Amino acid sequence: MFYFCRNAAVFFMSRLICLCNRITTNRIENFLKKFPQAELSDVMQSTAASTSCGRCRRELESFVRQIKGKHENKSKDSQLTIPFDYSFTIKKGPH
Ligand code: FES
C-alpha cells in the first residue's frame, strides 16, 4: 500500500512531459542525476521520451537543458573555495 501511494505521489507531483510514452519530468531528472553527461539522444533512448509522435521534443530539449544547467551550477558552487578569514586568528599575549 505504501509503495503504491509513494509511486502515485511521485507521479502526480511531477509533470508528464511525454504523453505518448507517459514519461514524467521526475524520470528525466532522475536519469540526468545518474548520468549528468548524457545528451538528449541518450535521454530519449533510455527513457523512451519523445520516441513516438515527437510532439514533446522541444519541451524535452528545454527541460534537459534546464536540468543540465542546474547541475552545472551546483558543481561550480561546490568548487568554490572560501578564503581563510584572518580576522578570527587569536593573538596570544606574552606570558
Ligand atoms: S508526446 Fe512524446 S512522443 Fe508523443
Image (cartoon, rainbow, N blue to C red):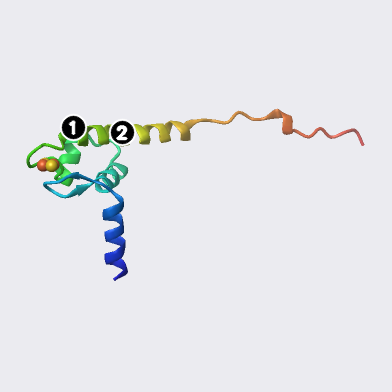
Relative image position of residue 31 (x, y in whole percent): 26, 45
Residue type (three-letter) at the residue carrying disc 1: Arg
Res. 71 image quadrant: top left
Q: CA distance from mark 1 to mark 2?
A: 12 Å
Residue depicted at 16% across the width and 40% down the height: 44
Residue in the picture at 21% in, 36% down: 60
Where 24 sits versus 70, above or below? below
Contact flag, marks 1 and 2 (Cβ < 8 Å): no
| Quadrant the N terminus occupies | bottom left
Q: Amino acid at mark 2?
A: Gln
Q: Is residue 17 left or right of residue 84?
A: left
Considering the numbered disc 1 on the image, is that residue within a helix, a strand or a loop? helix
Residue 8 at what x, y percent from top left? 27, 60
Badge 2: residue crowd in 10 Å (few <14, some 14–19, many ≥20) = few
Q: For numbered disc 2, what is the local secondary structure?
A: helix
The quarter of the picture where residue 32 lies is top left
Q: Is residue 33 left or right of residue 50?
A: right
Question: What is the x, y in percent for residue 77?
Answer: 47, 33
User: What is the residue that sits farthest to the bottom in this orientation?
Assistant: 1
Residue that label 1 marks: 58
Does 43 sit above or below residue 86? below
Q: Is residue 93 above or below residue 47?
A: above
State the residue at coordinates (70%, 28%).
86
The C terminus: image quadrant: top right
Q: Tell me if 29 is positioned left or right of 56 in this view.
A: right
The percent coordinates of residue 40 (x first, y second) are 20, 34
| In-front residue for pair 27/89 | 27
Residue 95 image label: none
Instruction: Find disc 2 in the rendering and name its residue.
Output: 66
N-term mark: 1 or 2: 1
- If the picture is divided into quarters, which one holds ligand 1? top left
Q: Please rate how many residues cluster around mark 1, counting C-alpha atoms within 10 Å: few if below 14, some from 14 to 19, many from 20.
A: few
